Amino acid sequence: MNAAEDPVAAVTRLRDEPWDRGWNGLEVAGVDLVSLDTRLGGCTSTWVANGGSLHERGMTTVRVILGQLEEVIPKLTEDDSPHVWHRLREMAQLIVTHNVPQVR
């Protein structure tokens, strides 16, 4: 994300990058990329639709995913498509850093 890009726009851009079917079944250290992408995708869609706000249950999911990515990324090889994992981590970090809590 560059300094001029707002976090919601950055997450939208990262979310809209194409998925390569060759990544299906990609797993590192027992973590399945498709599962991470799917779970993060749901939270991301809600966060973007709400203008950068996600409920606490969704934020818990994003934090868990971020933790899994932090554990997996150091173990990646070039064959593991590291750019995909880094993109997912960047999205999760942006959401955790820039979430505007929902007002009840």
Image (cartoon, helix red, strand yellow):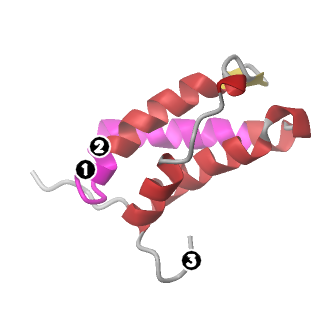
Measuring from the top left, give residue 83's x and y in whole percent: 74, 47
Measuring from the top left, give residue 68's x and y in whole percent: 64, 35
Q: Could you give the CA–CA distance between mark 3 and mark 1, rounded to whole angstroms?
A: 21 Å
Name which residue lies at 19% across and 54% down. Answer: 102
What residue is disc 1 on? 49
Main secondary-structure element of the magenta-colored stretch: helix
Amino acid on which disc 3 is placed: Asn
Disc 2 crowd, CA 10 A, few/some/many (<14, 14-19, 20+): some
Task: Please tell me whether residue 101 is drawn above or below residue 22 in the rendered image.
Answer: below
Dot label at residue 46? 2
| Helix, strand or loop under label 3 | loop
| Disc 3 and disc 1 in contact, CB within 8 angstroms | no
Name which residue lies at 32% across and 49% down. Answer: 47
Q: Which residues are magenta?
A: 46-71
Give the mark nearer the N terminus: 2 vs 3: 3
Say if residue 27 shows up in the picture. yes
Q: Could you give the CA–CA distance between mark 2 and mark 3, rounded to whole angstroms?
A: 23 Å
Q: Quarter-wise, where is residue 23 in the image?
A: top right
Magenta span includes 67: yes
| Disc 1 and disc 2 in contact, CB within 8 angstroms | yes
What residue is disc 3 on? 2
Between 77 and 65, the one nearer to me in the picture: 77
Dot label at residue 75? none
